[in-house]
Image (cartoon, coloured by chain):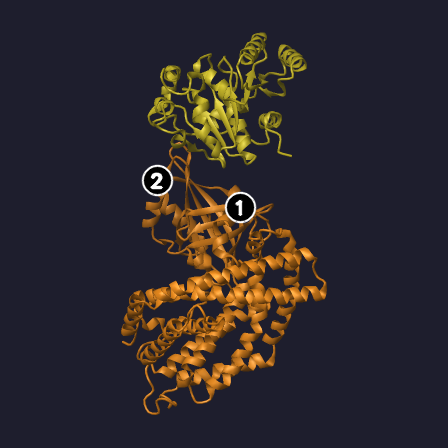
Amino acid sequence: MAPGLQEYVLGGGEENRGATLRDALASAFSIVADPGSTGVRRLTWLDTFDWRLYRAGLVLAHEQARRAGRLLLTASDGSLVAEQPAPAAQPRRPCLELPAGPVWDRIAALVRPRALLPMARAVSTVSVIRLLNADGKTVARLVTDAARVTGDTCEADLPVRVAIAEVRGYPGQARRAARLLSDAPGVSPAAESAFAAALQALRRRPGGYSGGVDAEITASMPAPVAVASLLLRLLDTMEQNIDGVLRDIDTEFLHDLRVSVRRTRSAIKLLGDVLPAGLADQYAAEFKWLGDLTTPTRDLDVYLLGFDAMAASLVAAKPADLEPFRAFLVRRRAREVRRLSAALRSPRFRTVTEHWRKALVEVRDARTPRKTKNSPNHPPTAADLAASRTERAHRRIVAQGRAIDQNSAPESLHDLRKRGKELRYLLEFFAPLHDPVAYRKAVSDLKQLQDVLGEFQDSEVQRDEIHALADAIMAERAAPAATLLAMGELAAQLAVGQAEARADFSRRFATFASPAGLQRFNTLLGQGDR
Amino acid sequence: MKIYATYNIKGGVGKTTAAVNLAYLSAADGARTLLWDLDPQGAASFLFRIKPRVKGGGQALIRGTKTLDGAIKGTDFDCLDLLPADFTYRNMDLLLGKKGTHPEPTHRIAHLLQPMAAEYDTVFLDCPPSISLVSENVLHATDILVVPLIPTTLSVRTLDQLTDFVAGFDGRRPQVRAFFSMVDGRKRLHRDITADLRAQRSDVAQTAIPALSLIERMSIERAPVTAFAPRSQAARAYQSLWDELRPAPAP
């Protein structure tokens, strides 16, 4: 359906549709079919795996034509945002970039580094009916669209949609046709976009994936049930990303997999004691194994994603000097992806996830609360657990942070970063139990502190890795001296960045642990233990 | 944006039929095309079944109180819009000649058309038959002046006068492209004049539009002959003329 047009849905069988339209409009217009305009339209709707366009209220479609295609970006109300020419062939594979043009300019920052995936396809028979005034002049057009949509696993026919296309200079006539159609039996205004209708027909839920925790927990839920629910949610996220990692569609699949593993490890460490005895200890090692598996590839992804910015920041060396380094990283990444894929296809991985799910489902669905080490008779509620563990984690980070001064070893900041992550995860796990305003304020404070700790540690890790990679490049004789010199400049820049982060730490921590900052956390916890 | 104008001092020589058919063919090529019916008689507007009326009249357009954009109507054909005629255009000379407004009186139509470049690839101006401030404005606004000639000695003289007039312009000058219109192949005089002038002047198109009743039928069908009878001799002749006049495709 052409963008920006008012749309209706036609009921009834194929044989009645023409009569429905004629009956609705004959009092005001002569109606003439335009057989020359009838044709087949092929659309492919695209979005990222995590529905970034959908969440931003945008719909992206590729329209196939005989000689050329075009990309149409519309708002959710159907109004055209941008369009650009595109290759004629329907997009079938994920793509990381669209050809340059107004559509890509509008969405590039939104979707990067995610790939655009074909979400659904439609093949439509499109017909045009002209509405004529008393002079026989076309003053509006009706465009009918009978589509069959196809997803990954099923097909479905959509209800026929009718759009009123305004002829320039005759807006009143289009409005008149709209009024008549609105009042006609068997015609109803389209409540959703064709894309939304296609997804519904294919039983797909737009926005169905999110990298967030979003576990369905309530304050009064027994703590073991709440913990099992959120661990199951994290396991879902892991499993949803496996295919994307194996197919190496984009780097965010691995990122989301890794984050969900890290969250799982933190949950096991901080909350695992409410689970049946031995379960947490048994799986802590398995998820460490899984987390460690993802590290080399993710580290290389981080380098490659930031490579252009890194190269542009060189002062003494030329960006081109780093190209052999990039090629080295790409080769190394390919090797690491193979290793990771083999592990994710291994029986060990399958066993871990299957058994973990089974054990968690048992806990979640248990009718009577289980006895635990800490509460042999009455296990705490989710709210009790959230309050006690968040409070403890917060107290710990404040105490550790206050003990850090200018002479403290870097390891003390690294350790504080871990505590920060643990507190952040606890806040995210129990987000549904907190007051949203107090939650946002507390997370914002913590994020400021985490950013500076992250900058400090990442700079050090990356610098160490550059040295290790330089050794590897030397050993393989994979690059000239100019590349190594450029890498040296990068390492120097990272050292400067780390020193700046260290200098910034005191100020950020002072804000986090200030009376106002502590009050914000107290407010959160006071409301969190409802 | 390429601006064409169909112009001749004489009336009834095929200006409007040429403008309507060439604009249709331009749009059929996929070029976003606007036809401005500058003739208060409104023949081009009539042929597209559009009422010859502009809100506020020519005065509002020339003074700029209404934009051209707001007066444009879509025709029944893809990519082809029309700026209708209005009976007030009969006073356009007075409106254009009014002192104290920017730019100078001979360049006001060119100035009005400038913003259209974002929306249209090709503009056709269908001019009223006269020598006036309107026609002078059109000559200054135009890239290609399409001059229909009926095959008489007098019309040849008219072409000479027009070419000399345009040659006297300072700066930008339109390219003059004449073609023979309403040619009756049975008349020896028509055959001789068309052959002689085409041989003598490179600015005369090789295509001639024959005098055919099907072209006159446009006023009954109220559509370009190139649209309602695309395989007719008349339509083929306009297509051939457009092939000579249209801009060469970009390399």
The type of residue carrying mark 1 is Gly
The image's mark for residue A37 is: none
Circle nearer the viewer, 2 or 1: 1
The orange-tinted chain is: A
Q: Nearer the viewer, residue A76 or A201?
A: A76
**Residue at the image position 51 percent from the left and 66 percent from the top:** A458
Which residue in the structure is indicated by mark 1?
Answer: A101
In whole angstroms, how far apart are the C-alphas of marks 2 and 1?
A: 42 Å
Q: Using the rendered image of the protein, determine whether residue A269 is visible from the camera's viewpoint.
A: yes
Q: SS for tag 1? A: loop
**Residue at the image position 43 percent from the left and 25 percent from the top:** B112
Q: Using the rendered image of the protein, determine whether residue B228 is visible from the camera's viewpoint.
A: no
* Total tally of numbered discs in the picture: 2
Q: Quadrant of the C terminus of chain A?
A: bottom left
Q: Which of the marked residues, 2 or 1, is nearer the chain's N terminus?
A: 2
The yellow-tinted chain is: B
Q: SS for tag 2? A: loop
Q: Would residue B202 be found to the left or right of residue A382 on screen?
A: right
Q: Is residue B247 above or below residue A174?
A: above
Q: Position of residue A203 (x, y in %)?
A: 46, 66
Which residue in the structure is indicated by mark 2?
Answer: A28
Can you tell which quarter of the image residue A223 is in? bottom left
Q: Position of residue A288 (x, y in %)?
A: 53, 78
The type of residue carrying mark 2 is Ala
> How packed is label 2: few (under 14 Cα within 10 Å), some, or many (20 or more)?
some
